[in-house]
Amino acid sequence: MAASHGVLVVDFGAQYAQLIARRVREAKVFSEIVPSTITAAQVREKNPEAIILSGGPASVYAEHAPKVDPALFTLGIPIFGICYGFQTMAVALQGVVTQTGKSEFGRTELTLNGESKLFANTAPSQSVWMSHGDAVSAAPAGFKITAATSDTAIAAFEDATGKVAGVQFHPEVLHSEYGEAILRNWLIDIAGCAPTLTTENIAESEVAKARDLIGTKRVICGLSGGVDSAVAAAIVQRAVGKQLTCVFVDHGLLRSGESAQVQRDFVAATGVELVVVDAVTQFLDALAGVTDPEEKRKIIGREFIRSFEKAARDIAAGGEVEFLVQGTLYPDVVESGGGSGTANIKSHHNVGGLPDDLKFTLIEPLRTLFKDEVRQVGLELGLPDEIVWRQPFPGPGLGIRIIGAVTQERLEILRHADLIAREELKTAGLDRIIWQCPVVLLADVRSVGVQGDGRTYGHPIVLRPVSSEDAMTADWSRIPYDVLEKISTRITNEVREVNRVTLDVTSKPPGTIEWE
């Protein structure tokens, strides 16, 4: 049997599994997300220290609703159920879940019922975050009911040891007042998980896994210019050295200085072999006159595939290339429906898929990581700050931050405005506080203005600063007025084609981060 291996988070189909995994790692315990179809035998093989059953969107009694394998509870492994996971745990252990007609959504007051290992050192009454329609109406035999709300009589239960326990609310959500303490109580004090996880451990583990998987085979990686593909490539390069060749398709749609950074700084930091494909004219010609954002995405994806395919064939001509490295993060997986498999280019390269005769096995060393973890791993691997702390950037690049047709002139206007915004945010010490600040050119809109003694008819620019943990949701960032003033003044003074700067104050949802 394998050595004990962190916490398995069983995913019942909601995004909550990722948030739970994140909170477990914040407690310095390794976490791995596994599907709800996992069997007791598969769990035994993984030999985790503990299991957490996540929330989910379904009713436990709905047709085809995911269920936990009851045999999990015979393995002697501590198990914690959250929301849907709490309910499916109750059913598996011969408790009862019913439709009570009393749904609870959002902030709810929870009252504790006497002593509880799970709720140790928390308040007798506390605010929690609920999201459920069904409820546990009878706890399994031998379990103590430890908490309730005004509408949910059984909001938590635990066995005599506390090692098998569950809650109806979401402790992983920051709105739950003692959520972090409850998770730590169970993980560290009750389940006995060792809080030893560091990004150094993650980096070492992923390097070892890549080395074992690849062996002596050759590998290619498409660098996008962003931190994700850079860190993924750095991991594989550390694992197999010269067996890796990176391909950078310079499509001319990156921000100011980024193309040079990839070619200079990344190579200097890693020593990786880099093939640069100059495709600027190719992409501009293909995008000429196109204004529909989805069509732009498809065109950019198609041209990327064409460029990448040619480079891949040239590389493979020197001997078989078996693996393709991608910088897929967990939010990418969630927002693309959980897709996986061979010969798929992830959405930030505009999924188009590689030709059938280019057979690659995917290596995705970042697939279970969040952006902040990726950055820390990048630092552990010695990547320069300029790459590690680069704000997230869409694969289609500035092509979808120009609202209207993409031309060389419009790209230069947007690059200049974007550079000013990034410089001022950095000077103000905000570039690592906000998630990112897309700068959008409303190219097909003209706005009347006055500059000097003359009337102007220039382009408006939109600033879209957002704050987020993982980009699944986001809020608009409250940038100080004096910083906004500097950005606006510099852009309208220095970018002569722009005479108006606006601020987007829409959250996600309903608005996306990118405008397109």
Image (cartoon, grey):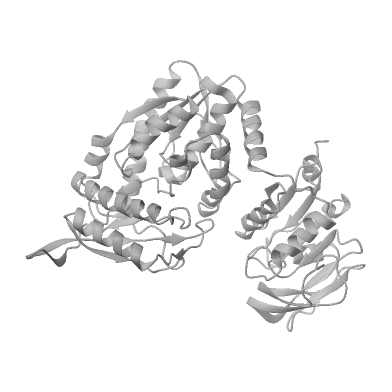
Q: Position of residue 98 (x, y in %)?
A: 76, 75
Residue 176 shows in this picture: yes
Viewer-proximal residue among 488 and 31: 488
Q: Position of residue 491 (x, y in %)?
A: 24, 57
Above or below residue 494? Residue 356 is: above
| In the displayed structure image, the side of residue 451 where residue 329 appears, left or right | right
| In the displayed structure image, the side of residue 2 where residue 59 appears, left or right | left
Residue 357 shows in this picture: no
Q: How many marks?
A: 0
Residue farthest along the bottom direction in this orientation: 150
Viewer-proximal residue among 508 and 346: 508
Residue in the image at 70% along x and 44% along y: 197
Q: Quadrant of the N terminus?
A: top right
Viewer-proximal residue among 387 and 34: 387
Q: Position of residue 137 (x, y in %)?
A: 80, 76
To which quarter of the image does residue 2 belong? top right
